[in-house]
Image (cartoon, rainbow, N blue to C red):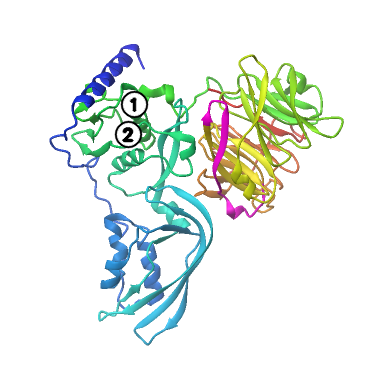
Amino acid sequence: MSFRRKAALVAALAAAALAAQSCTSLPANTDPEVLRAYDPQPSEAQNLEPVAGEDPDVTLRGFYQAAAIPTQDYQAARGFLGDRAAVDWDPHESTLVIDRINITTSTTRGSNARAFEVAGEVVGSLDANGSYTAHTGSYRAEVELEKNADDEWLLTDVPNGTLLERGQLLEHYRPRDVFFYRSGGDRLVGDRRWLYSQLRAEPSALINRVLRGPSEPLAPAVETRAPEDLTYTGFQDGTFHFVGAGGMSQEEFSGLAAQLAWTLQRAQVSGPYFFEFDGSVLGGEDGVSADDFTDVSPEREAESPPEFFALNENGVSRVSANTTQPVGGELGQGGRVSSAEIADNGTAMAVRSRADGDSELVVGAVDGPVAPVLQASTIARPTLEPDGESGWVVVDGERIVRASRGAGGAVETADVEAEELEDLDGSVSVLRLSPDGARAALIVDGRVYRAAVARPSPGERRLEQLSEIAGRLEGTAVSLEWLPDGDLVVGTSNAQSPIWQLGHDGAELSPLPSENVSAPVVGVAATSSTLYLTDSLAIRQRSAGMTEERRYWREVPGLQGVRSLPIVARATE
């Protein structure tokens, strides 16, 4: 953003803050409108209705297909209900996501009445704001149907709430990120919401979700600039209107505008954006865009591709242009290193074996000296925070320790509070912090968990909202790493599907091509263009955008025949 543009924006924000303190009246006309002219499309619900003479189980399945369409208060689904049931049924009570809906005849009550058992394995749920939470469990309920005078079967008794098959969620809904500030306010963090794909006023829906605040799983790690009294009143004449901004400061206006602009930009809504607060438009005639708020951008673009390293029995090597070269420091001089993490600023944390059989955590420079800071029976691979100066390890499979370099250069250690881990059986074998530092992914006894990283004070960290997000892997997870887009790649011991991609909320889980991959996959790493893994035989790579027709992983050039663990340098802020 140019200096002139930045100065104009600062002046506009100051004017908005002043106006908000002196004006709290409603705009003259705030009837909500859609952002774009409506282009009529064939409705998904057009052919979803009871059919005369159709078998009752087919009608029941049609109801569940229609229930995936929430428009007009589930009008399509209500068309399958009898008069009383259409009034009594509350689809908003809950939305469960089922792996597959199974329908079995329960009882036959004459020729005009049927009861069916509806069952399935629950994999997750959606809340009213579209936030997905992974679950495991079973669903079982009875649904009754009666035949009417038109020879149509209608549901007369159906439980409240809606059921979505996993495939329906992925087909009829799309993920969108709404943005909040990481605790401390220095970077925006995406909070995924699933919105119906044919929602005509999606921008307004996203803005309302920003104002309602973060989802429960992410809430401990983030904060918002939206005051509780602020209300979104609609979109008209190219402007998003808000009331209740009285008392907001210039910094709060700027912070909220950044949340809104990045949310709309990521949803592919074209800018600039015009936000009117109590009659005052931010940015004046120019409006605002995500480019005005690059200082808190959720995207961290490196000046050059991240360095790639490999760890094997000879230590840590730098891999470049099909060649390998041991790093210049201690980590490249021997085979005692069992795991390592490297930042793009040159910081390195590694675990080395000791002569007495214990492990030690060492901290220093990848091309320089390292010093021990912690000793234990076992220490899991380190994971760095976004600043590159602090990192976490799991000690003896139970205790999480944060090592941080203080102002004087000395490395200090402190426990990370993680009370919810105490309720789980098994040891923590893998811990990885997300690129934005707001989430952590863990493997406990082969199962994948996600948690929010709370920051009660500058030097204190706490894991909260721990939840399993990949129950379908059934305890086979061995390794994992965050992808640059915020999702995860998971290596497993499953011979049929040894490598998976996992959405960070658990809603999406799909196997990656693996024809020549031999389980277990003990190491994974990723850049925006390349995926790396170490299987039982070798270290391999594959283009992240490779088509399904090219399903094979190639050995990493320069490391053919040398089984190694992949390390991608961590981008720092």
**Above or below, 387 relative to 267:** above
User: Which residue sits at x=67%, y=18%?
Assistant: 410
Quickly name the residue at label 2. 227
Q: Secondary structure at mark 1?
A: helix
User: Which residue sits at x=23%, y=42%?
Assistant: 34
Which stretch appears magenta? 456-477
Residue 54 location in percent, x, y? 35, 76
Residue 325 placement, left or right of 431? right
Residue 551 location in percent, x, y? 61, 45
**Residue 374 visible in the shown view:** yes
Tell me, yes or no, whether the two marked residues, 1 and 2, touch with CB atoms within 8 Å: yes
**Residue 558 visible in the shown view:** no
Foreground: 316 or 140?
140
Residue 475 forms part of the magenta stretch? yes
User: Which residue sits at x=66%, y=23%?
Assistant: 412
Nearer the N terminus, badge 1 or badge 2? 2
Residue 328 placement, left or right of 491? right
Q: Quadrant of residue 431?
A: top right
**Above or below, 41 relative to 286:** below
Around disc 1, counting alpha carbons within 10 Å, would you say few (fewer than 14), some (14 to 19), or many (20 or more)?
A: some
**Above or below, 476 relative to 339:** below
Quickly name the residue at label 1. 252
Q: Secondary structure at mark 2?
A: loop
Around disc 2, counting alpha carbons within 10 Å, would you say few (fewer than 14), some (14 to 19), or many (20 or more)?
A: some
Residue 460 location in percent, x, y? 57, 30
Amino acid on which disc 2 is placed: Pro
Residue 342 location in percent, x, y? 65, 25
Q: Residue furthest right?
A: 355
